[in-house]
Amino acid sequence: MQPLQEKNYDSEFCGSIPLHLINLIQPHGILLILDKNTFTIVQVSENIEGVLNIPVKKIIGQPLSAFIDESVMEALRSKTDKWDIKDRVSINVELKAGEQQKMFSATLYVKDGYVMMELEENTAATAMQSFIHIYQEVKYIMAVLKEAGNTQEIGKIATAEIKKLSGFDRVMLYQFDKDWNGIVIGEAREPDMEPYLNLRFPASDIPKQSRDLYFKNPYRVIPNRDFTPARLVPVVNPMTKTFTDLSESILRSVPSVHVEYLRNMQVMASMSTAIIIHNKLWGLISCHHKTPLYPGYEMRSAFELLANIISVQLTAKESEKELSYRSQLNMLNGKLIELMYASKDFIKGLMVKTPTLMNLFAATGVSIYYEGEMHVIGNTPKTEQIRELIKWLQIQKIDKVFATDSLPRSFSKSQEYAGVGSGIIALPISYRKGEYVIGFRPEVIQTVDWGGNPNERIQFEPDGKTYHPRNSFAAWKETVKHTSLPWSAQEIEAAESLRTAILERILSDR
């Protein structure tokens, strides 16, 4: 019998595309590369011609001061030189365009040897009014989120209030699982939009390369999917002699396959903001709009702040839940250790009186093989099947606590007893002698609701190079077999603690 193959809906192909070296930007802003020492313009996006009414060739090589007042130049130099800042720096600037002056929000990224500067058109009056309004709304959302009782409530409140604040047609709170598939745990949407709440999306929708970029740029904005990208001129950055790294760029262009993905979703504009917990990408605030929509600097900053607030609230709720469960398990563990030491036969102390190992592991059956004898309580595989499992554990050299919720995927023979042992937690007493404590959990057949068939997530053309995303996001059901309820980190910790106590008891007996 062949072992089951675990489905991986991530995409090594998509995840290997160098998204940060595409040399193109979206045209709702302009990009300049400046010599760090002289602030001379060495590379620009070609759409700067439409802003300054000067050919690109005449702009390259000019000092930035030719287009910006000296007082602003001093502020720029101060912000980029002082304190050795590594994060992006923002400032409002006026560009001289002939007889006119245009106000822009500027974002600067200080690199080794050069400064990357992005400019997005703005007006000071609108920005101030927008800032006051957004600040008031953010404070309100912060107050409401504090009252949320659990993750689901955080998702419901956050999406409803962010939709109201931002004006997006749909706002989702999207959480990654251990395989980087995403599930929508909160959604606020316009009535005519297809619901995605509780649907799961394959990891290939946001492949590894895209996920990694969220650590360099906390949000991703596409104001209009039908944009014509602007090239960087010259093609190679004169300061680095390579393509300019656009990892942190707000304006960075979008691969055509993602544009097609948005078109298939009937979305014209999108924005996503990272939620990072314990230095790991936990999920995203993902927003869609049916028509073009440009969230300005103030709104994007609000999203970044709200993402941080949501991450704090999620961490607090999860910590509270984990602490409560850990405390409960510690009490059970303490009682079991007492019973084990109070009994002449430590195995009876763990399996006969209450509580038993079944209570600690939340298992439906437990076996202990020790000194040539097999002891079982509850629902377990047959003795011979347990012996075969022990041999497999020995071959795998399992000499520490081991837990899996999908044993048949690794050990094909266990498919025969998946109904009682799809999940196991194994505590080695002596793996060389094949002495183990094993807790069993039964199969829990699950129906997973996907946003579209994940098996059709990427469709290649005959050339094997051109590919397309799936064109349907209608709910698609998948039945998952040979899995049990997962083992929590707290349960594994409790098992490790108990194993130490068992080994100490055996040593004291000897």
Image (cartoon, helix red, strand yellow):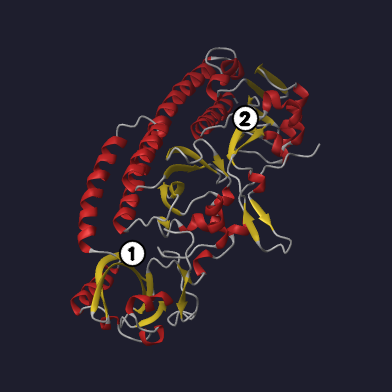
In the image, 204 versus 402, the foreground residue is 204
What is the distance, in whole Å, between disc 2 and disc 1 at their CAs?
Answer: 45 Å
Task: Please give the name of the residue rendered at 54% of the width and 62% of the height, measured from the top-left corner.
Answer: 255
Nearest the viewer among 42 and 265 is 265
Q: Are marks 2 and 1 in contact (CB under 8 Å)?
A: no
Residue 87 seen from this side: yes
Which quadrant of the view contains residue 28? bottom left
Image quadrant occupied by the N terminus: top right
Nearest the eye: 492 or 291: 291
Q: Which mark is residue 446?
A: 2
Does residue 402 show up?
A: no
User: Looking at the picture, does residue 496 appear above or below residue 95?
Assistant: above
At x 34% / y 50%, what residue is drawn? Answer: 303
Identified at 23% across, 58% down, the residue is 126
Q: Which of the two labelled residues, at mark 2 and mark 1, occupies the earlier sequence position?
A: 1
Q: In the rendered view, tell whether residue 302 sits above or below residue 226.
A: above
Q: Position of residue 107 (x, y in %)?
A: 32, 66
Residue 168, position as x, y percentages in the image: 39, 47
Give the x, y percent position of residue 80: 28, 71
**Amino acid identity at mark 2:** Gln
Hey, what amino acid is under mark 1?
Arg
Q: Residue furthest top?
A: 353
Q: Which residue is mark 1?
A: 88
